């Protein structure tokens, strides 16, 4: 069965425009690949947090996905999450918009993110700027947050990106039952613990060397079994916490 046959739709009305959000089922990207365009790098990223392989176009998108994997404030994320079809006015003109990323946040909000190398990418194309403005109105109407993120200013920055890269690299480290129980008991007793103590707790429970225990702790972050503030430099004393969990969609 084709991807198109698998789609389901959800409609929203805004002002003089009719908008339809077309999604693939079961939290899958609506487009499973991106074509090479304007010499941008493209590829696929596998997320443990979202349990999906997703396409990316440009290092800004790729890096934001890695940040989303490492950030405990993000419950789940999806690249190419839907096609937004906007019919403008009373005519037949239709605008199609594919957002770069959808993020379901720990506070329950849905965030739609458009990643750009610079703001000039939008300002240089009036038609694209109009489409983005219309898309923002649609997302506001359905209660979603819409953000344009400039990679150089908000993604490719220190220490955010280096933290995310280190954590993301260890996302598939094996988390055993003993390590999980040891961390749960420590959280219950203390509420939070220092990064170095978390590494020691995992090492003691699993009988690991510190290097392996550190990788397991990073996998805890990617699965939201533990959390750390990745916007700040991670040190031995950085606070490791247990993220809140809500019911799944």
Image: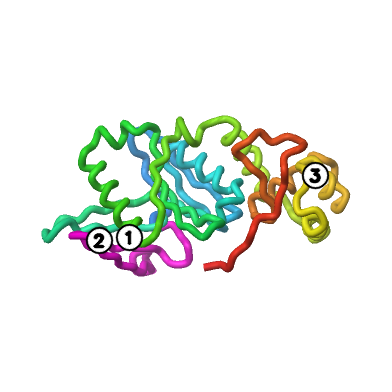
**Residue at the spot 21% in from the left edge and 42% down from the top edge:** 127
Between disc 3 and disc 2, the foreground one is 2
Are the residues tagged 2 and 1 within 8 Å (C-beta)? yes
**Sequence order check, earlier mark of 3 and 2:** 2
Image quarter of residue 106: bottom right
Secondary structure of residue under mark 3: helix
**Residue at the spot 37% in from the left edge and 40% down from the top edge:** 36
Question: Which residue carries the number 2 mark?
Answer: 14
Are the residues tagged 1 and 3 within 8 Å (C-beta)? no
Q: Nearer the viewer, residue 70 or 206?
A: 70
Q: Which residues are magenta?
A: 1-29
Question: Which residue carries the number 1 mark?
Answer: 141
Question: Which residue carries the number 3 mark?
Answer: 199
Q: Is residue 161 left or right of residue 11?
A: right
Rounded to the nearest whole Å, what is the CA distance between mark 2 and mark 1? 7 Å
In the rendered image, residue 221, in percent from the top left (x then y), is placed at 67, 49
């Amino acid at each position: 069965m084709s991807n198109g046959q698998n789609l389901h739709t959800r409609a929203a009305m805004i002002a003089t425009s009719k908008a339809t959000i077309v999604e693939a089922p079961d939290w899958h990207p609506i487009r499973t690949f991106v074509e090479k365009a304007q010499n941008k790098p493209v590829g696929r990223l596998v997320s443990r947090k979202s349990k999906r392989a997703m396409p990316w176009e440009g290092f800004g998108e790729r890096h934001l996905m890695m940040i989303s994997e490492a950030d405990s404030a993000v419950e789940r994320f999806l690249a190419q999450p839907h096609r937004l079809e906007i019919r403008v006015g009373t005519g037949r003109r239709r605008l199609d918009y594919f957002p770069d990323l959808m993020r379901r946040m720990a506070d329950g909000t849905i965030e739609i993110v458009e990643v750009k190398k610079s703001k000039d990418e939008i300002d240089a194309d009036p038609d694209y700027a109009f489409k983005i403005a219309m898309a923002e109105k649609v997302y506001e109407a359905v209660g979603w947050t819409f953000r344009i993120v400039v990679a150089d200013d908000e993604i490719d920055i220190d220490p955010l990106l280096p933290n995310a890269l280190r954590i993301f690299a260890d996302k598939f480290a094996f988390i055993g039952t003993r390590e999980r129980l040891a961390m749960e008991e420590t959280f219950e007793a203390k509420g939070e613990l220092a990064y170095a103590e978390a590494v020691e707790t995992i090492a003691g429970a699993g009988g690991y060397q510190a290097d392996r225990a550190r990788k397991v702790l990073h996998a805890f972050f990617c699965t939201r079994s533990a959390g750390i503030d990745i916007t700040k430099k991670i040190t031995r004393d950085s606070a490791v916490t247990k993220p809140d969990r809500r019911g799944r969609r």
